[in-house]
Image (cartoon, grey):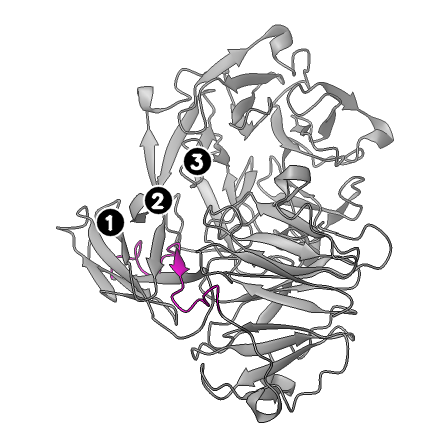
């Protein structure tokens, strides 16, 4: 179930109050001036585009109408019933405009300006990738990556209430749109009556795109993607979070985070030309003390508060699990129709193990159960916890090579060009070994001993969760919880400088690794090779101490590339940092840099140990 609760805001509580474009308002939101907040662009009956610049902030928007030359759409008139959407269709880093209209075609206006000062020039004929598309009447386009190949496909609502699907068979920078019909159209069979107006978002938090469709009678129809990122299947059900919303006629939904709380709010255009605003709140809200949760093995604890944002009609039980790294003072909290709005506190303690991990991360997952269907099995964001280690070596520690039976790897022959890493893959509290290889495979050695006396036993066939994975040549694995679900995902470097991402779709004790491609891979587009044939050797760590994991990547030329996570712990976005913004900028091992991070001197921060070609 979706963990959202919609509250309609009216009057001064609606930041879009007072906006009236006449009739048939069709809003969309984008940062047109490059100042980091969302501006409003609104289509209307007579075919123009109204532009309201956000002169407020990310969390408190103020929408101010721009006219004349201050409106980059000044002079654009597509005839009747303008329905705008925005996307970077030519891959130049700024937003282009695609506009549906009364007679069913799509107009394309390329941004020939910049990110901060857009200028829109109509593209016609073969310069318009939508040239020749005509869905009949009242085209309402939206662009999204429906097949997970990293480029944008087109989904178009129309007068007859169906949804047309045009798959991008071209590229990110040179799209080619081919209509998909029958079973090749995942919306085949969907008909909401008339004037379908679609928009997309991951409403159920499962990593794929669900669809919300407006229509003539003012309702919002919700179709959940019960398929996958690459093969969507859209299913209507009783759990419609927009149930009960009706704005009168011609609902034109847009989803955007207008209050900066991380949740998508719902803005709906209407037949009367106004904009309806529904603020999105979490049904179950968790507030971390000080904005984050930090604990120490054998030392400091931390806490967070849990509360409901709406009154249930039955008891709601929230259950917490801390995995192998964390424990909580309570495993369940119960909210009743009487105490639902009284916050309850959970105290978090780190499990005091004997493994020297340095500063590391743990996750507390939460699930709900209730006879109130709105609160039953809803998706609650996991709590990310930073754990300080108390098993760190002191600065005076001396490392002595162990040979023979004192070396737990003594009987393992890894040949050449192997890249090992150690994580607790089966959730039994000790470290297992996963080893990359020249042939692109991953070898898995399960620790069948203990955390203090390891015994490594190779797992093959179906006992090896990486059995069918092959990335080509020189696989270099590392592991982290990239999607915030409490288990370890795999990130694998390889000989061509890319990073392959395999999401753990199993559990923390029985992992199943599923490759993610296109936009589902947060490392999509990263290529560290400065020349042909290079090796990417990644590790992940919180370098900037902002609570999420950044990426450090060793390369064939001996340097270290640094990609800062500018997204979040559960939805990372990796942005390359160069020059002085890269703390590893001065490191050059000559060739084949292979980084690792640990607190070697016991001062509480991460030191870098970098392997190189000569061993």
Q: Magenta segment, principal secondary structure?
A: loop
Q: Nearer the viewer, residue 88 or 315?
A: 88
Disc number at residue 266?
3
Check disc 2: other Cα within 10 Å, few if <14, some if 14-19, many if 20+.
few
Check disc 1: other Cα within 10 Å, few if <14, some if 14-19, many if 20+.
many
Compare marks 3 and 2 and give the one earlier in the sequence. 3
Q: Give the image quarter of residue 67.
A: top right
Compare marks 1 and 3 and give the one earlier in the sequence. 3
The residue sitting at the left extreme is 338
Residue in the image at 21% along x and 47% along y = 311
Q: CA distance from mark 3 to mark 2?
A: 26 Å
Q: Label 1: which residue? A: 307
Q: Label 2: which residue? A: 291
Q: Indicate left or right for 150 with 11 as reference.
A: right
The span picked out in magenta is 371-396
Q: Nearer the viewer, residue 378 or 591?
A: 591
Q: CA distance from mark 2 to mark 1?
A: 16 Å
Q: Residue 596 in the image: state x and y as whole percent.
A: 60, 62
Label 1 with label 3: CB-CB less than 8 Å: no
Q: Residue 444 in the image: state x and y as whole percent.
A: 62, 80
């Amino acid at each position: 179930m979706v963990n959202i609760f919609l509250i309609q805001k009216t009057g001064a509580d609606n930041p879009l109050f007072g906006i009236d474009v006449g009739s048939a308002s069709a809003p969309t939101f984008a940062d047109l001036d490059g100042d980091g907040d969302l501006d409003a662009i609104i289509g209307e009956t007579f075919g123009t585009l109204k532009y309201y610049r956000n002169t407020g902030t990310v969390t408190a928007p103020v929408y101010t109408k721009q006219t004349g030359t201050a409106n980059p759409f000044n002079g654009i008139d597509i005839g009747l019933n303008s329905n705008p959407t925005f996307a970077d269709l030519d891959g130049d880093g700024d937003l282009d405009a695609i506009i549906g209209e009364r007679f069913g075609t799509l107009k394309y206006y390329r941004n020939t300006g910049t990110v901060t000062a857009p200028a829109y020039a109509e593209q016609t004929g073969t310069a318009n990738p939508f040239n020749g598309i005509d869905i009949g009447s009242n085209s309402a386009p939206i662009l999204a990556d429906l097949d997970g190949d990293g480029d944008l496909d087109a989904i178009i609502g129309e007068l007859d209430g169906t949804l047309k699907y045009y798959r991008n068979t071209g590229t990110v920078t040179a799209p080619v749109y081919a209509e998909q019909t029958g079973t090749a159209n995942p919306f085949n069979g969907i008909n909401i009556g008339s004037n379908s107006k679609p928009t997309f978002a991951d409403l159920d938090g499962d990593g794929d795109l669900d669809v919300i469709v407006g229509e003539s009678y003012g309702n919002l129809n919700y179709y959940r993607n019960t398929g996958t990122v690459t093969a969507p299947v859209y299913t209507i059900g009783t759990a419609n979070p927009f149930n009960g919303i009706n704005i009168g006629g011609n609902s034109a939904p847009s989803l955007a985070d207008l209050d900066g709380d991380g949740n998508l709010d719902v803005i709906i255009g209407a037949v009367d030309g106004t904009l309806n605003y529904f603020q999105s709140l979490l049904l179950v809200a968790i507030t971390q003390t000080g904005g984050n949760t930090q604990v120490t093995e054998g030392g400091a604890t931390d806490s967070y508060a849990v509360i409901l944002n709406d009154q249930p009609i039955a008891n709601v039980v929230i259950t917490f699990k801390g995995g192998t790294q964390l424990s909580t003072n309570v495993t369940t909290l119960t909210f009743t129709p009487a105490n639902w709005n009284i916050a309850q506190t959970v105290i978090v303690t780190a499990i005091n193990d004997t493994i020297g991990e340095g500063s590391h991360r743990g996750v507390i997952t939460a699930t709900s159960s209730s006879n109130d269907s709105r609160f039953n099995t809803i998706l609650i964001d996991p709590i990310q916890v930073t754990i300080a280690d108390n098993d760190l070596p002191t600065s005076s520690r001396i490392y002595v090579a162990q040979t023979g039976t004192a070396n737990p790897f003594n009987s393992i022959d890894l040949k050449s060009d192997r890249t090992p890493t150690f994580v607790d893959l089966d959730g039994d509290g000790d470290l297992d070994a996963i080893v990359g290889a020249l042939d692109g495979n991953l070898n898995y050695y399960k620790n069948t001993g203990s955390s203090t006396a390891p015994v490594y036993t190779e797992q093959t066939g179906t006992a090896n969760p990486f059995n069918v994975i092959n990335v080509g040549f020189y696989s270099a694995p590392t592991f982290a919880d990239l999607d915030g679900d409490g288990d370890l995902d795999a990130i694998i470097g390889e000989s061509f400088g890319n990073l392959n991402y395999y999401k753990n779709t199993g559990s923390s004790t029985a992992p199943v690794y599923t490759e993610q491609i296109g936009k589902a891979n947060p490392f999509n587009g990263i290529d560290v090779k400065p020349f042909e044939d290079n090796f990417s050797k990644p590790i992940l760590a919180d370098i900037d101490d902002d609570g999420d994991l950044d990426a450090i990547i060793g390369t064939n030329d001996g340097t270290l590339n640094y990609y800062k996570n500018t997204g979040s712990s559960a939805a990372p976005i990796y942005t390359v940092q160069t020059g002085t913004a890269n703390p590893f900028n001065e490191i050059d091992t000559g060739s084949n840099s292979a980084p690792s991070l640990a607190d070697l001197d016991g001062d509480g921060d991460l030191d870098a140990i970098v392997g190189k070609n000569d061993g």
